[in-house]
Amino acid sequence: MALSPSEKLDKIRPIKASLKDSLGHCSICPRKCGADRAGGKKGYCRAPVNPVVYSYAPHHGEEPALSGSRGSGTIFFTHCNMKCVYCQNYRFSQLDAGEEISIEKLSHMMLGLQSLGCHNINLVSPTHFVPQIVLALETAIANGLTLPIVYNTGGYDLPGTIRSLEGIVDIYMPDMRYSDDNMAKRYSDAPDYVEYNHASVIEMQRQVGDLAVDENGIARQGLIIRLLAMPEGISGTARTLRFIKENVSGNAYLSLMSQYYPTFKAYSYKEISRGIAPEEYQNVVDEARKLGLNNGWVQEGPESRFWGTNIEPRSE
């Protein structure tokens, strides 16, 4: 059951000091690089002590259960703890475009998105700014924020950091990008991605369970897993689907994405220098259905449509 605003504040207060202190020897993601961000140093992700935001606005192109009719209140954070050579957001994830802001301004962004009628607050690439986000949420909730919080991550998260967010985050939306660490190393410089990704997704599922929606089909709580199909089977999605079925939930909600296209440094790698062939994507969809993973969305061009069994509102 999703917590009330006052209950969320009770969850935040005991952990905010330790999260803030962690910035003195940064260990909030699997890299545990030890950078003294509080002292002005930067680690692998290049993120400073203050949050850096590229953009924030209602987003109508997310999964239907998030975008609804009024949009998902996205906040795109600059920097990243991976270096994906094909990143479609490379201008701010790798080239660091964005504005460094205060915790207070971040909380104002959240409240502003709520005032625009968004269905949720969608934190995009939040991993390296978890302490700052928690502090901003404390202020925003104290000033009237009531929307569900979405943790929209590339999936390279530390399970301990995810555990600290229990009761604060309502909806987790991780990528499960790879099933082979050799591929994760080659294309994202994340040599232990699979171990941390699997453990974090299991923890997310433990906290929030399968997706629950309201009477209008808008997500209120739960897990949505994004799976990006890549050329030549590089993502190993079939293996990931079997992991989900056996270790996460047979009722998991999946977003099967066909939107890969070569950009940034992808043209330096012949095997990923093209888009997805229709049969490659269809193989992923067929594998999900074969495993009985029938909840979620497939992509047809830039739009997503629902497939599988109907999402039924689940009482909270």
Image (cartoon, helix red, strand yellow):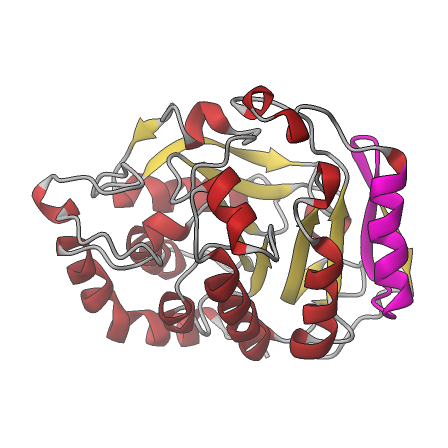
Tell me the quarter of the picture where residue 211 sits. Answer: bottom right
- Horizontal side of residue 38 vs 157, given as left or right: left
- Horizontal side of residue 114 vs 102, given as left or right: right
Relative to 164, does residue 144 appear above or below in the rendering? above
Position of the C terminus, as image quadrant, is bottom right
Q: Residue 256: x and y, percent?
A: 76, 49
The residue depicted at 46 percent of the width and 54 percent of the height is: 156
Q: Residue 305: x and y, percent?
A: 86, 45
Tell me the quarter of the picture where residue 173 sits. Answer: bottom right
Relative to 70, does residue 276 appear above or below in the rendering? above
The residue depicted at 66 percent of the width and 48 percent of the height is: 235
The residue depicted at 73 percent of the width and 39 percent of the height is: 232
Please check the rendered image and state whether residue 296 is part of the magenta-colored stretch, yes or no: yes
Q: Which residues are magenta?
A: 279-304
Q: Residue 36: x and y, percent?
A: 12, 48
Q: Residue 288: x and y, percent?
A: 84, 61
The number of numbered discs placed on residues in the rendered structure image is 0
Looking at the image, which is closer to me, 6 or 282?
Answer: 282
Tell me the quarter of the picture where residue 81 sits. Answer: top left
Looking at the image, which is closer to me, 254 or 76?
Answer: 254
Relative to 206, does residue 214 appear above or below in the rendering? above
Looking at the image, which is closer to me, 82 or 70?
Answer: 82
The residue depicted at 17 percent of the width and 48 percent of the height is: 35
Q: Is residue 122 visible?
A: no
